[in-house]
Every structure is written in structure tokens, then in C-alpha cells.
Amino acid sequence: MRDTQSGQIFVITAPSGTGKTTLTRDLRNTVDGLGVCISHTTRTPREGEVNGESYHFVDQTTFDAMVSNGEFLEYAPNYGNAYGTSLAAAQVVLDQGLDLVLEIDWQGAQQIKALRPDAIWILIVPPSMETLRQRLESRQTETAATLKTRIEAAQTEIDEAKAADYLIVNDDLDTAKQALRSVVTANRLRFARMIGTKPSIAALFSA
Ligand code: ADP
Ligand code: 5GP
């Protein structure tokens, strides 16, 4: 991946059902200058999911070919399916000077951190495991079997995210939305980033 002066990568992970999609959608609707990559997956589309919008839904052969060709910035197996972020799509966002928001799992987050230590990893957790179960059930997207798998995977998702930079508890939704916006906004005010991206501000400092 080419280095980029301006675009920052924000990686958002959470146990399935925590509210990551809800919170990330709000972030994108309320904060300017953010770009996303539509991930590729071998998973079957859920009802209402549109190819090219929710995901690029591809078969295993296509996914494997993309892996062989080095087309993924990161990829990982999840619940028996494969998921990956296209390197080219990520580069397009960063080259535009936009900040890239990646909604991925802990395996992908660890890969991104290894590649780009300056990426900001935000972990979102539910206030309790019982709340997580209730949210997954209320979403009505899981069978009894997939619900069990996702609850079991939730503990791993949390345990494997100890290298995250920020931790947001999604209890009250509005508070969590505000917290997520604050992380992005505060990171944009980092001294090095301000100097690197705003020549008129950099010019205030004597050489
Ligand atoms: P994820 O993307 O992490 O799997 P979703 O954003 O799909 O989670 O949220 C799972 C369910 O929980 C959805 O029905 C959503 O409306 C609900 N939800 C999300 N955040 C909250 C919250 N803070 N309080 C109550 N319900 C929530
Ligand atoms: P779902 O099937 O519920 O859409 O997603 C299952 C898990 O895969 C979630 O934790 C989601 O964040 C993760 N995921 C989605 N896209 C990607 C991706 O491109 N890379 C990785 N590593 N994980 C992804």
C-alpha cells in the first residue's frame, strides 16, 4: 500500500450485534471527508442486501483468485465465509485525501495495524453479553445456530482487540454516536496531521 500524506485509516471492530453498522452509518452521515470500501465476501446476501452496496458478493473461486493476485489489503475467514478489503478500493479513498473507515473483524484489524501502525483501531463493545444477545435476536437476521456461533465468536472478538486504540461502549446509542464522532474529530486535530495537511496553518510556524 502506498504511503499517503493525508488520509487516515480508522478501523472499527465490534462483536456482531453490538451496533457497529448503526454507529458507522451515523458517523458517515454526520462527519465529512470519510470514505469506505465495500468489502468482498463469499457469504450469501441477507434479505435486503444489495450486491455492490452491502458487499461485493463473490464465489469462493473469485475470492481465491483475488487472494492469489494480491488484490486484498486484508482478508479473513469468518463464520465459514471469507471476507476481504480490496487494496485498490482502499487506495482510491486515501488518494482522494479522504479518511478511510473500515468495518471489519479483529483479524483484519490486526493485519491493518501490522501494515499501517498509524491506523486508528476503535473497538465497540456492548454493555453486557446479555444485551448483545438481545440485540442480535431483535435484528432477526440469525437462525438459532448462527446466533449461537455469533455469541461464541463475540468473546474472541473482544479478547483479540486488546491492541485497539479506543474503546466505546454502545449502551446509550446517542452517547456512543457522539463518542465515535469525537474520536475521528480529535484525530484530525493531531499536531502532525494539521501541519501535514494544512499548508496555511503550517506557515504560521517559523522555520
Ligand atoms: P452490528 O453491525 O454490530 O452487527 P447492528 O448495527 O446491526 O450491529 O445492531 C444490532 C441491533 O441492535 C440492531 O437492531 C440495532 O438497531 C440495535 N442497536 C444498536 N445499537 C443499539 C443501542 N445502543 N441500543 C439499543 N439497540 C441498539
Ligand atoms: P456479516 O456477515 O455480519 O456482514 O459480517 C461478519 C463479520 O465479518 C463482521 O465482524 C464484519 O465486520 C466482518 N467483515 C466484514 N467485511 C470484512 C472485511 O472486508 N474484512 C474482514 N477481515 N472482516 C470483514
Image (cartoon, grey):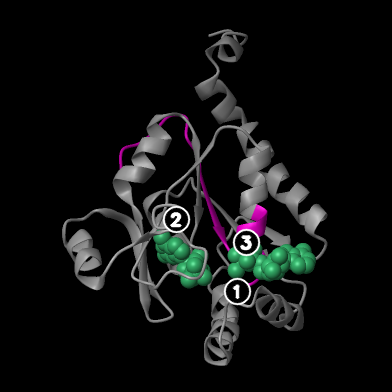
Q: Is residue 137 left or right of residue 72?
A: right
Q: What's the magenta region?
A: 1-23
Assess whether mark 2 and mark 3 are in contact (beta carbons under 8 angstroms).
Answer: no
Are the residues at dot 1 and dot 3 in contact (C-beta closer than 8 Å)?
no
For badge 2, the amino acid type reads Lys
Q: Secondary structure at mark 2?
A: helix
Closer to the N terminus: mark 1 or mark 2? 2
Q: Can residue 176 be seen at all in this image of the molecule?
A: yes
Residue 145 location in percent, x, y? 53, 92
Q: Secondary structure at mark 3?
A: helix
Q: Real-space Cα distance between discs 3 and 2?
A: 19 Å
**Where is mark 2, residue-wise?**
113
Closer to viewer: mark 1 or mark 2: 1
Q: CA distance from mark 1 to mark 3?
A: 13 Å
Q: Mark 3 or mark 2: which comes first in sequence?
A: 3
Q: Is residue 87 above or below residue 201?
A: below
Query: Which residue is denoted by mark 1 in the rendering?
Result: 158
Sequence-wise first label, 1 or 3: 3
Give the class, few, some or many, for how many residues have Cα within 10 Å of label 2's Cα (few <14, many ≥20).
some
Q: Which residue is mark 3?
A: 20
- Residue beneath the point at 61% across and 43% down: 28
Residue 205: name its quadrant: top right
Residue 137, position in %: x, y?
Answer: 68, 81
Q: Position of residue 61 (x, y in %)?
A: 19, 70
Mark 3 near ligand 1 (CB under 8 Å)?
yes
Quadrant of the drawing holding the N terminus: top left
Nearer to me, 136 or 205: 136
Given this view, does label 3 or label 2 mark the residue nearer the observer?
3
Q: Is residue 41 magenta?
A: no
